[in-house]
Amino acid sequence: MFHSDYKHIIDRLPESLVKRACQRLLHHSKDPVPLESIFKKFKRIESYLRRTLEVYENSFNKKKHKTMAQKKYCALEAGQNALKHDYEEENNHWVMNELKEYREWITANKKMRYEIKDLKMQVLEAEKELASMKSNSIH
């Protein structure tokens, strides 16, 4: 398609970009390159191909950089999720311990209430007995 002197540039470009460069040169709105001239060596064609290669390599490097940045972000996010998971697990463990302790307090509280009730009943019985003893002694 292009002159063989441009092979070192064309080999570094994807085929689709080479075809697009040819189409753009042929159909340029202000100064199209004639079809016969595409196969010849021209400074304008060489500079256009170099510029296309430069843009392609820059965008490729940006994509590569973005991909690396995304991998770092994903690794960071995974680490944060692991930390979040650890915190959740730790919080769940803490809540379960608090709940267990709370239930133990409730059980102990109920036990004490029953004991207090029993003691009150014993006190009432003792008071009744004492009262009956007093009334018997007065008579």
Image: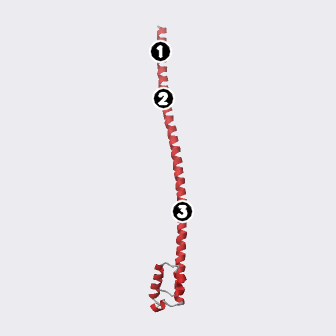
> Mark 3 or mark 2, which has the lower sequence index?
3
Q: Are marks 3 and 1 in contact (CB under 8 Å)?
A: no
| x and y, in percent, of residue 65 in the image | 55, 69
Q: Residue at x 47, y 18 (%)?
A: 125
| x and y, in percent, of residue 134 in the image | 49, 12
- Kindly identify the amino acid type of the residue bearing the numbered disc 1: Glu
Q: Residue at x 53, y 90 (%)?
A: 42
* Front residue (pair 101, 109): 101
Q: Are marks 3 and 2 in contact (CB under 8 Å)?
A: no
Residue lying at the far front of the rendered structure: 4
Nearest-to-viewer mark from 2 and 1: 2
* Front residue (pair 75, 128): 75
- Kindly identify the amino acid type of the residue bearing the numbered disc 3: Tyr
- Kindly identify the amino acid type of the residue bearing the numbered disc 2: Arg
User: Within 10 Å of the Cα at label 3, are there few (<14), some (14-19), or many (20+) other Cα atoms?
Assistant: few
Q: Residue at x 49, y 17 (%)?
A: 126
Residue 129's disc number: 1
Name the residue that disc number 2 marks.
113
Nearest-to-viewer mark from 3 and 1: 3
For residue 117, say whether it is visible: yes
* Front residue (pair 31, 97): 31
Nearest-to-viewer mark from 3 and 2: 3
| x and y, in percent, of residue 3 in the image | 51, 88
The secondary structure type at the circle numbered 1 is: helix
Mark 3 and mark 2: span between their CA atoms? 58 Å
The secondary structure type at the circle numbered 3 is: helix
Mark 3 and mark 1: span between their CA atoms? 82 Å
Name the residue that disc number 3 marks.
73
Q: Residue at x 51, y 49 (%)?
A: 88
